[in-house]
Image: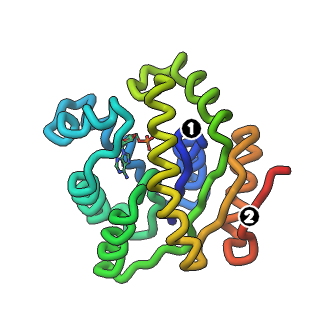
Amino acid sequence: MLIIGPPGSGKGTQAERISERLGVVAISTGDIFRANVRGETPLGVEAKTYMDNGDFVPDSVTNKMVRDRLREDDVDGGFLLDGYPRTTAQVDYLDSILAKGEQKLDVVLQLTADDEELVIRLLGRAKETSRSDDTEAVIRHRLDLYHGQTEAVVAKYAGRGILTKVDGIGGIDEVTDRVMRAIENPSRVSVVSGR
Ligand code: AMP
């Protein structure tokens, strides 16, 4: 399955919880990039400037990283991708990886939240963490990329009938409850609202 959402929508937190409850491995491209930046690996050195500016790391780099990660043994029982695909070219690439492995996506979950709420949340997170991409200008740029590029990804999966939208505004446990309900009944629930 995939979890897609704007920056600050809580997708990383929810991905960890889904992973624990369903026993599938969660793979966050942002976490893999950050670990590489910390380790000063060639991949990290290449990704760092893009990340600091809130830009997407080029598809060629990101796609190869995801392909290698999906070749590892722990994904055999299924996986949850967090933060990939973010461009329609990445959707096509993921399609080709899945086709080769005779795998298919069961659910694409989109967490929704209002931009201004997200800016407030992310500026709050910036006080607690040292993420270099949590300044207001960079946050707004990341939101613009989400609307400009990743919403087209969401539209593709909606067209395939596997998209489930979940309202990401509310307490963490409350959102997890909505997410789990949406996963359990993906074909019946297309929008799980908190209101
Ligand atoms: P995240 O933790 O998901 O917000 O990702 C942090 C940063 O990592 C993003 O702002 C991008 O610079 C980079 N990144 C993560 N996933 C992708 C992706 N699928 N495509 C391109 N860049 C990505």
Q: Is residue 93 visible?
A: yes
Look at 44% across and 55% down and name the residue there. Answer: 149
Tell me the amino acid under the disc marked 2: Val
Disc 2: residue Cβ within 8 A of ligand 1's nearest atom: no
Front one among 142 and 194: 142
Q: Which residue is mark 2?
A: 191
Q: Do the numbered discs 1 and 2 sit on residues whose CB atoms are within 8 Å?
A: no
* Horizontal relation, residue 23 to residue 173: left or right: left
| Image-quadrant location for residue 34 | top left
Look at 51% across and 21% down and name the residue there. Answer: 126
Give how far across and how far down residue 183 sits, in percent. 66, 66
Give how far across and how far down residue 5 sits, in percent. 56, 50
- Give the colouring mode of the picture: rainbow
* Horizontal relation, residue 87 to residue 59: left or right: right
Q: Is residue 187 above or below residue 140?
A: below
Give how far across and how far down residue 190 sits, in percent. 71, 69
Give how far across and how far down residue 101 sits, in percent. 32, 78
Helix, strand or loop for disc 1: loop
Q: Is residue 143 above or below residue 106?
A: above
Q: Earlier in the sequence, mark 1 or mark 2?
A: 1
Helix, strand or loop for disc 2: strand
Look at 30% across and 73% down and name the residue there. Answer: 97
Q: Residue furthest top?
A: 127
Disc 2 crowd rating (10 Å Cα; few below 14, some 14-19, many 20+) is some
Tell me the amino acid under the disc marked 1: Gly
Q: Which residue is mark 1?
A: 8
The span from disc 1 to disc 2 (Cα, nearest Å) is 20 Å
Q: Is residue 13 above or below residue 18?
A: above
Q: Is residue 176 above or below residue 132?
A: below
* Horizontal relation, residue 65 to residue 81: left or right: left
Q: Is residue 26 visible?
A: no
